[in-house]
């Protein structure tokens, strides 16, 4: 069997994923990140229930800069997953399947998630 004339299958260095595929993969990854981040939220709530000493220890750990950065990214994942989920609800209702519309709504979901994240953190730090 000759294989010299077979086309080479594209790989990630050649093939660029479509924007909607990137958003789909991101939606799944943010779902995983949210489930992992929920463990941190539960640990914080357990520390709050365990008493002032445990809560203070959790506050020191969660107040560190690396954890704050991770919490900022987790907040973005939360809002992205929410906005993209609303987009999927419209798809379930049969709206927005045109390629131009899916691209615009995808970009809107990314932008809205960024704005909601910044707004949430501004509210958290100013109150």
Image (cartoon, rainbow, N blue to C red):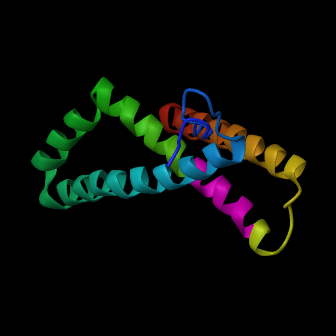
| Residue 65 pos. (x, y %) | 32, 24
The residue at the point 28 percent across, 56 percent down is 39
| Residue 87 pos. (x, y %) | 73, 59
Task: Give left or right: position of 101 versus 118.
Answer: right
The residue at the point 49 percent across, 32 percent down is 125
Number of numbered labels in the structure image: 0
Q: Is 83 within the magenta?
A: yes
Along the line of sight, the residue nearer the viewer: 100 or 39: 100
| Residue 76 pos. (x, y %) | 53, 41
The residue at the point 53 percent across, 36 percent down is 121
* Identity of the residue furthest to the front in this view: 1
Q: Main secondary structure of the magenta part?
A: helix
Task: Give left or right: position of 59 versus 86.
Answer: left
> In this rendering, is residue 9 above or below 41?
above
The residue at the point 75 percent across, 73 percent down is 92
Task: Give left or right: position of 98 versus 107.
Answer: right
Along the line of sight, the residue nearer the viewer: 36 or 48: 36
| Residue 120 pos. (x, y %) | 57, 41
Q: Quadrant of residue 6 in the image?
A: top right
Along the line of sight, the residue nearer the viewer: 44 or 39: 39
Task: Give left or right: position of 19 versus 94.
Answer: left
Q: Quadrant of residue 38 in the image?
A: bottom left
Q: Which region shows up in magenta?
A: 79-89
* Identity of the residue furthest to the left in this view: 53
């Amino acid at each position: 069997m000759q294989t010299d004339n077979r086309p080479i299958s594209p790989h990630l260095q050649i093939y660029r994923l479509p924007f909607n595929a990137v958003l789909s993969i991101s939606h799944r990854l943010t779902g995983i990140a949210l489930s992992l981040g929920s463990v941190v939220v539960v640990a914080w709530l357990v520390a709050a229930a365990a008493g002032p000493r445990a809560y203070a220890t959790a506050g020191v750990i969660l107040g560190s800069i690396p954890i704050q950065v991770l919490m900022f990214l987790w907040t973005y994942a939360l809002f992205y997953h929410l906005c993209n989920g609303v987009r999927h609800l419209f798809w379930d209702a049969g709206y927005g399947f045109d390629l131009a519309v899916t691209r615009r709504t995808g970009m809107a979901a990314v932008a809205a998630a960024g704005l909601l994240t910044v707004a949430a953190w501004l509210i958290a730090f100013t109150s």
